[in-house]
Amino acid sequence: MKSASKFEKVAARCWNLLNEGKPFTPIFVVGTMLLFHMDALTDLPSALALFESLLYVIPVLILYYIFDFPLFLRNYLWIPFVVYLIIWNDINIGLLFFSIGLYFFFTVFFWGTLYYHLRIGTSWLNFTRFWKLVLKNSDSTSGNAQEQLPKFLLVLSLWNFFFEKISFNTPVEILPVLFFYIFVLVFAYILHKNLFDWKPSMYSGFTRDHFPQPEKSMTDKAIVIVIDGMRKERFYEADTPFLDYLKENGTEYMNMETVYPARTVVCFSSMFTGTYPKEHGIHSNMVWKLGIKVESIFDSLRKVGKKGRLFGCAHLVDSMGSDVETFTAVMHNDKVDSTIMERAKKIMKEQDPDVFIVQMIATDQTGHSRGVLYDEYLQKIHEADRLIKDFVEWLKQEGKMDNTALFICADHGQADGIGGHGHLDEGERFVPFFIHGPNIAKGKKVEERHSLVSLAPTLAYLMGAPFPSHSRGKVLLEAIEKGDRDNG
């Protein structure tokens, strides 16, 4: 299996500019306006008027960048557009229809069909389902039509209004514009202050202040397999005999909560530092400043002469750098997980890390390209089960499972629509999480709510390594058999 090339890493970052809702809105608005008024660019006075009028809409673009309107909050986004129509009653029907057509061309055909066909091999007819997923998606990404439409229709209408005023040397009345922007600011603030109430609570103290550090390791190795984007109730519905065996003969955490926002790079950063975005500095898949700001489990392991390795997709490098060995995600989705697990065997054989983390991506990619409520999604979970069984049996043959803790989890779930995840819609928040191994309690179900930030300190605890510097997660002591803890 090929590693992700430098080009793929850069391409992944560029794609996130179009995938993440915050940067997409201004990029789409500017691109649409320039295309619609392409003739103005050939005339210097008109071109200057076009760019001067852009300055008038920058405040609302900033407001829409600062404030997300995911989930049900998107329903309120039509109110500023209606207020605009009441105040100015000026729209360019051609521009609005052009922007709507361009948006659905980008999301349904370019993204949902061409992009997924070239990257993971979906059918050229994927658009026949993808348009429904885009209309249903509730997460704050470019694929959330119900959020993006009122945003860009308002900004384009404002921009075109100012452009026409400046082009015809008609003065722009600043006071109504100022009052309108103040209204949008206050409106967004009140909504988020009173209705944006679904973020998970965070642990306040550091792990080291609440949990003792063991004097020696309790396990020789730890293997963490992250089935990216595996929705919890869909996992229970899937045919997974081996994973069922592991969770029934290990310890399962029934209410394991992901972090906010539930983006892959954010989740992995939190899982393996033990803390939250405000401390580790990764706030979305679009990483503006590379590298986490705090210690990771890999730093902790190095302090005791041990080695950790994360085998994952290209954009995980953005947070954890050289501790990540990458694979290319440009591969048919029916082959990618099996290729990943074969490469994982090679890494274990050649590098023999003490803590090895593997990311499987076919389930997540199926959710994004085909939706989570279809049989294809269950099939990918079933395939993951078969591949993990094969990998564990190979580890046993190699003598690497004698005293090894095996963690199986997802980094986040997935919502309806295009399998969106980030703002914790139904299906995103709680993830499958269970541990199996010689030191792990068998047949135990933990009902207490826990957070994925507990993964890093639990790994450190089992491996006899210090907790990462800013780790706030709880050590998952319920899973560790009492006799083994007393020996630590």
Image: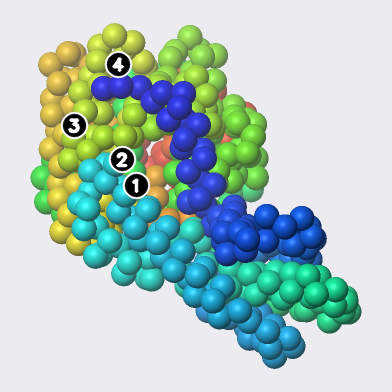
Front-lying residue, 411 or 417: 417
How has the structure been colored for display? rainbow
Q: Is residue 287 above or below residue 324?
A: below
Q: Is residue 140 above or below residue 475?
A: below
- Distance between mark 3 and mark 2 Cα atoms: 16 Å
- Distance between mark 2 and mark 1 Cα atoms: 6 Å
Callout 1 amino acid: Tyr
Q: Quadrant of residue 326?
A: top left
Q: Tell me the element at label 4.
A: helix
Labels 3 and 2: the sequence-earlier one:
2
Does residue 194 appear left or right of residue 212 in this picture?
right
Callout 3 amino acid: Ser
Labels 4 and 3: the sequence-earlier one:
3
Q: Nearer the viewer, mark 3 or mark 1?
A: 1
Label placed on residue 347? 4
Mark 1–mark 4 CB contact (< 8 Å): no
- Distance between mark 4 and mark 2 Cα atoms: 25 Å
Callout 4 amino acid: Ile
Label placed on residue 115? 1
In the rendered image, residue 13, in percent from the top left (x then y), is placed at 51, 38
Question: How many numbered callouts?
Answer: 4
Q: Tell me the element at label 2.
A: helix
Callout 2 amino acid: Arg
Task: Name which residue lies at 21% across and 28% down.
Answer: 339
